[in-house]
Image (cartoon, rainbow, N blue to C red):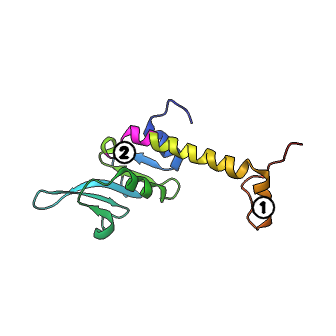
Amino acid sequence: MSENLQPYEKLAKKLNIKISEDYTYNPDLQISTWNTADGYSLWVMTDDPNNVSWENEVFYYEPSFDDIMERLQELDDEAEVYVDDIYELLHPSDIEQWLENQDEKEEIYEDDVLGDPLRNARMTANGVLPLQNRSTKE
């Protein structure tokens, strides 16, 4: 990934989604505050603002970064996400840390699974195909 991309662009590229603070009609996921009749704020994270699941999509407190990331990872490719206060909900330093952790997990996976020819052979023998066939050096 290019180092000159902003954290939001890096995250969007990593998850293959579009994230914006600019509202578009009918986003695939909307993360925003709603106000009650008596002046309280609620946080809503929903794919359908016209049919909100109050038990699962409405938060009395601001949803955590981990809750938001879990939901973002569930989205289909090219999904559009509206976040009304992107800097507050998805702070750049949290995104950078998450991206670093994901890169580390991918490296560990590649080292553990792809870098071990014997493990690849065991996986193949057990009916599990490795992600990539690697030839061993003699």
The amino acid pointed to by label 1 is Arg
Residue ID for mark 1: 122
Q: What kind of residue is marked 2?
A: Leu
On screen, residue 96 above or below 121: above
| Of residues 40 and 137, the one drawn nearer to the viewer in this rendering | 137
Task: Please name which of the two marks, 1 or 2, marks the residue nearer to the observer.
Answer: 1
Query: Which range of residues does the magenta coloring cover?
Result: 89-96
Asked whether 108 or 60 is in front, the reply is 108
* Image: 62 above or below 122: above
Q: Is residue 72 above or below residue 3?
A: below
> Quick one: 18 or 55, which is closer to the camera?
55
Q: Residue at x 31, y 55 (%)?
A: 63
Quarter of the image where the C terminus is located: top right
Q: Which residue corresponds to the image point at 78% horizontal and 62% vertical from the top-left?
A: 124
Q: How many marks?
A: 2
The quadrant of the image that shows the N terminus is top right
User: Can you give x and y, in whole percent of width and height, for residue 30 in the image?
Assistant: 35, 56
Rendered position, 7 above or below 73: above
Looking at the picture, how far across and down is residue 41, in whole percent?
Answer: 18, 55
Q: Nearer the viewer, residue 99 or 38?
A: 99
Residue identifier under label 2? 90
Check whether the beta carbons of the residues at disc 1 and disc 2 lie within 8 A of each other. no
The location of residue 26, given as percent across then percent down, is 37, 58
Q: Which mark is residue 108?
A: none
Element carrying mark 1: helix
